[in-house]
Image (cartoon, rainbow, N blue to C red):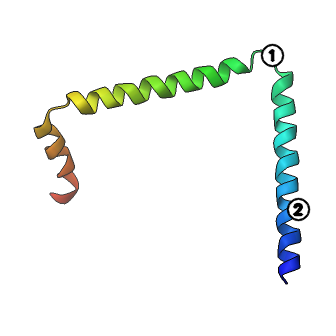
């Protein structure tokens, strides 16, 4: 039984590796694909920093009021 599980696990990882390699090969053929990764990281970073700044600068009374909203019902 343990041998069957090991074989299935090996087949899954082999299939996953070939699928990922095919996807990488497709991405390498697209010109300018690197801009998508860079732009998505930039959007995430800017959003994260804005939220961090908002939390840091937010009024503590407003945060307490917002945190009690689910309990006031």
Q: Residue beneath label 1, please? A: 31
Res 73 seen here: no
Residue 52 relative to residue 40: left or right: left
Label 2 Cα crowd, 10 Å radius (few <14 / some 14-19 / many 20+): few
Can you give x and y, in whole percent of width and height, for residue 52 in the image? 33, 31
Residue 56 relative to residue 47: left or right: left
Query: In the orientation shown, which residue stands out farthest toward the bottom?
Result: 1
> Which quarter of the rendered picture does the C terminus lie within?
bottom left
- Judge whether 62 appears above or below 72 on screen: above
Frontmost residue, 11 versus 43 = 11
Residue 47 relative to residue 8: left or right: left
Front position among marks 1 and 2: 2
Query: Would you identify the image quadrant in which residue 46 lies?
Result: top left
The secondary element bearing badge 2 is classed as helix
Count of marks placed on residues: 2
Query: Would you identify the image quadrant in which residue 5 lies?
Result: bottom right
Res 62 seen here: yes
The secondary element bearing badge 1 is classed as loop
Q: Are marks 1 and 2 in contact (CB under 8 Å)?
A: no
Q: Residue beneath label 2, please? A: 11
Can you give x and y, in whole percent of width and height, for residue 34 in the image? 71, 20
Q: Residue at x 38, y 26 (%)?
A: 49
Mark 1 to mark 2: distance in Å?
A: 33 Å
- Judge whether 8 appears above or below 59 on screen: below
């Amino acid at each position: 039984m343990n041998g069957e599980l090991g074989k299935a696990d090996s087949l899954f990882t082999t299939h996953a590796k070939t699928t990922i390699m095919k996807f990488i090969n497709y991405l390498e053929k697209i010109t300018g694909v690197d801009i998508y990764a860079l732009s998505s990281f930039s959007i995430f970073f800017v959003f994260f920093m804005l939220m961090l700044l908002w939390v840091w600068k937010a009024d503590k009374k407003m945060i307490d009021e917002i945190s009690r909203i689910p309990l006031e019902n």
